[in-house]
Image (tube, grey):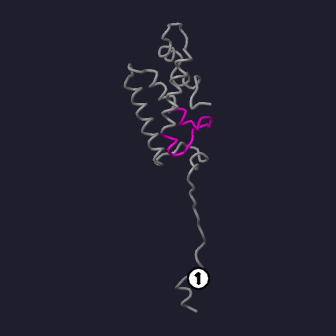
Amino acid sequence: MTYCTRDDLIQAFGEHELIKLTDHARTGAIDDAVLDRAIADAEGEIDGYISKRYGQTLAGVNLPNLTRIACDITRYRLYDDATIDTVRQRYEDAIVFLKDVAAGRASLGNAEIDGVGSFRVLATSADRRFNQDALRDY
């Protein structure tokens, strides 16, 4: 399973744009081989960042933030040398977010996943009955 799918990309950017970016043979349809290669490249880039924190790939885990980022990186890869400013900015924002995730400054938005590799313990207790002041009275 992947971070993003063909359908995710169509929903995010429209079929027309994906045809324009992948249909080098001018068949009028999305070239799945070109699309799959761009998705794989994006996933490799994402894994390079998140594996530092999680020690594994998270493909197959439902993480909307990761799907959005994978779509933005895939789109950037598809634009290749003809990247427009909006696409480049979304890519750069995605990379900044991934760097923050790797450094522990940002979360992928899933408590189960974010708990991998680190544990946070929060302990509370009632007020102490016996402290130095209470013991002096005896």
- On screen, residue 31 versus residue 88, left or right, reads right
* Along the viewing direction, whichever of 66 and 33 lies nearer the viewer: 33
Work out whether 130 lies above or below 121. below
Q: Quadrant of the C terminus?
A: bottom right
Q: Residue at point 59% right, 65% down?
A: 123
The question of residue 64 being in magenta is answered with yes
Q: Which residue is drawn at the image coordinates 50% and 8% (left, top)? A: 25
Q: Nearer the viewer, residue 58 or 55?
A: 55
**Residue in view at x 47 percent, y 44 percent:** 102
Q: Quadrant of the N terminus?
A: top right
Quadrant of residue 131 within the rendered picture: bottom right
Give whichever of 94, 43 is nearer the camera.
43
Q: Amino acid at mark 1?
A: Phe
User: What stretch of residues is rendered in magenta?
Assistant: 49-68
**Location of residue 67 in the rendering, given as x and y in whole percent from the top left corner:** 55, 33
Q: Nearer the viewer, residue 42 or 12?
A: 42
What count of labels does the image hold?
Answer: 1
User: Which residue sits at x=40%, y=33%?
Assistant: 92
* 31 up-or-down from 95: above or below: above
Q: Position of residue 30 (x, y in %)?
A: 55, 14
Q: Is residue 41 magenta?
A: no
Q: Where is residue 111 shown, x and y percent of the image? A: 59, 47
On the image, the x and y values in percent for residue 48 come to 49, 37
Residue sticking out furthest to the bottom: 138
Packing grade of label 1 (10 A; few <14, some 14-19, many >=20) is few
As helix, strand or loop, the secondary structure at mark 1 comes to loop
Q: Which residue is mark 1?
A: 130
